[in-house]
């Protein structure tokens, strides 16, 4: 079920949002997620293993991601994928952040778009 205008979703942590963003294009295992986040943020966000796997466990528990099959070369390595609910949550967070940027532009904290 999509999030409606009256649904209130608290802001996501940086780790949570970046993991959801990393999975938006397809399945990844934990190490690949961490590397993608680091690359996408030019090193501004680095997920240490404890944060990464704690967050992945929470996202699994919340039904925002699902676990795929084990890697045939390493049974400890699992792929994760975004669920429909996780995608809606990520989209809602992206929209929330877009609204924040809009307000910052209106208040001249950021340059206007050209």
Image: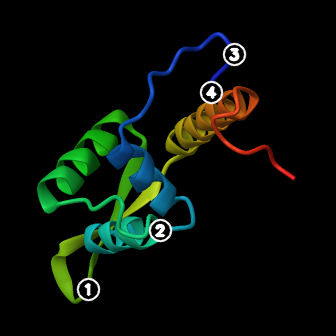
Crowd class of label 1 (few under 14; some 14 to 19; many from 20; radius 10 Å):
few
Distance in Å between CA atoms under marks 3 and 4: 13 Å
Residue where numbered disc 3 is placed: 5
Q: Tell me how far mark 3 sits from mark 2, CA to CA.
A: 30 Å
Left or right of 49, for residue 1: right
Specify whether 80 is left or right of 110: left
Circles 4, 1 touching at the beta carbon (< 8 Å): no
Q: Position of residue 98 (x, y in %)?
A: 66, 38
Choose mark 3 or mark 2, whichever is in front: 2
- Identified at 42% across, 53% down, the residue is 18
Residue 1 — which label? 4
Name of the residue lying farthest toward the bottom: 73
Mark before the other along the chain sequence, 1 or 3: 3
Whichever of labels 4 and 1 marks the residue nearer the N terminus, that label is 4
Query: Which is nearer the N-term, disc 2 or disc 1?
Result: 2
Disc 3 or disc 4, which is closer to the eye? 3
> Hey, which quadrant is residue 3 in on the image?
top right
| Residue position marked by numbered label 2 in the rendering | 40
Q: Residue at x 23, y 55 (%)?
A: 52
Residue shown at 50%/21% (left/top)?
A: 9
- Which-is-in-front pick, marks 2 and 1? 2
Q: Residues within 10 Å of mark 4 (few under 14, many from 20)?
A: few
């Amino acid at each position: 079920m999509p999030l409606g205008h009256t649904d209130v979703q608290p802001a996501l942590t940086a780790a949570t949002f970046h993991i959801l963003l990393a999975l938006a294009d397809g399945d990844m295992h934990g190490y690949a997620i961490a590397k993608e986040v680091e690359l996408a943020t030019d090193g501004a966000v680095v997920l240490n293993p404890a944060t990464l796997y704690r967050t992945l466990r929470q996202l699994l528990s919340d039904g925002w991601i699902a676990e795929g099959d084990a890697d045939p070369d390493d049974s400890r390595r699992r792929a994760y994928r975004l669920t429909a609910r996780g995608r809606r949550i990520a989209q809602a967070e992206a929209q929330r952040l877009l609204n924040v940027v809009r307000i910052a532009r209106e208040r001249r904290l950021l340059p206007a778009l050209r």
